[in-house]
Amino acid sequence: MIEAEGLGRTFKVRGSLVHAVRDLSFTVEAGEFVGCLGPNGAGKSTTIKMLTGILAPTTGRLRVAGFDPTRRRTALARRIGVVFGQRTTLWWDLPLKDSFELVRLLYKVDRVTFRRRLDELCEVLDLSHFLRTPVRQLSLGQRMRGEVAAALLHDPPLLILDEPTIGLDVVSKAGVRDFLGALNAERGTTVLLTTHDLGDVERLCRRVVLIDHGRLAFDGTVTQLRALVPGEVTIEDAVARLYLSSRPDPRTRHPRPAPDPPSVTA
Ligand SMILES: Nc1ncnc2c1ncn2[C@@H]1O[C@H](COP(=O)(O)OP(=O)(O)OP(=O)(O)O)[C@@H](O)[C@H]1O
């Protein structure tokens, strides 16, 4: 479903090059639920933007749902759903249902299929009581359920989410997680999720891809991730150790010793 090979993206900032993503290679098979982790500024959002065709890679080769995202952005849009937790794709002043109607027109979904899909999504995401509310009046949790529904109205086989649970309370978070888990398990939708919430990873992801300084730092199962640190550890401990190991030691300015083994690539 996703094949990235030697992917890189640089930005020119005030005359200097920022290497946001470097030589990144990974694949995601159909039906997988993969978590993408990494410290702030690691290159996760840049990677998501390249996967969705928003940014063109500077180097490397990329295929998503059978398409080169940069060359076939429109065709790709019909095969993927995208949710950016920190940004809305809905129309701020319109009632939620009007946003859905615009999404229907954009994606050329016929009315009968749309009605059926919307009914399903309204039921599982519990949207019915705020369908007529303007998006700007929705709570964050309601809006996020609306964002997820909008991304799935055209029934894409691949869903890409950038921090979908950011700022949600425990109940809303559980609702979104339950929905995503069922979507993957029952409908077979492939999901790639970036998050700083390791609860998302524990509950949903079988596999984790960890990006640090724009490079792949780990690719393996959650169990392999935990095994990087000796003893009974939480996933937080394992991830914190990985993040710290790549940070320069302030005393020596050299990276700290990596965990043993330093990384696992599946
Ligand atoms: N449009 C841009 N122009 C210049 N630099 C950019 C741009 N977008 C991202 N960067 C830089 O690329 C690097 C990676 O940023 P990116 O947003 O991909 O990280 P991230 O892992 O998503 O971080 P976070 O977890 O904080 O959201 C950072 O150094 C950032 O400042």
Image (cartoon, rainbow, N blue to C red):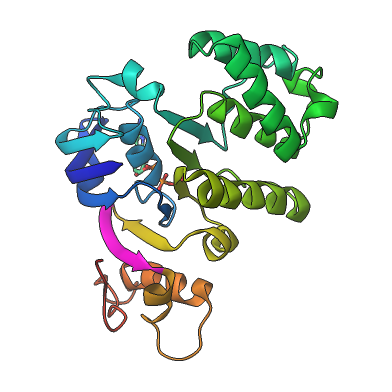
Residue 17 in sight from this viewpoint: no
- The correct choice, above or below, for 119 with respect to 191 in the image is above
Q: Quadrant of residue 213?
A: bottom left
Q: Position of residue 66 (x, y in %)?
A: 25, 32
The answer to whether residue 184 is magenta is no
Ligand 1 image-quadrant field? top left
Residue furthest right in the image = 129
- The correct choice, above or below, for 184 with respect to 82 in the image is below
**Which quarter of the rendered picture does the N terminus lie within?**
top left
Q: In which quarter of the image is residue 63?
A: top left
Q: Nearer the viewer, residue 168 or 245?
A: 168
- The correct choice, above or below, for 128 with respect to 134 in the image is below
Query: Image point 24% across, 67% down: which residue?
Result: 265
Query: Image point 52% across, 55% down: which residue?
Result: 196
Q: Position of residue 114 (x, y in %)?
A: 61, 18
Residue 27 in sight from this viewpoint: yes
Q: How many marks?
A: 0
Q: Position of residue 76 (x, y in %)?
A: 34, 24
Q: Main secondary structure of the magenta part?
A: strand
Q: Quadrant of residue 9?
A: top left
* Left or right placement of residue 227 versus residue 146 in this view: left
Q: Which of 67 and 259 is in front in this view?
A: 67
- The correct choice, above or below, for 218 with respect to 35 in the image is below
**Which quarter of the rendered picture does the C terminus lie within?**
bottom left
Query: Image point 25% across, 45% down: which residue?
Result: 21
Residue furthest bottom in the image = 231
Q: Position of residue 26 (x, y in %)?
A: 24, 52
Q: Give the range drawn in magenta.
A: 214-221
* Left or right placement of residue 230 versus residue 259 in this view: right
Q: Nearer the viewer, residue 73 or 56?
A: 73
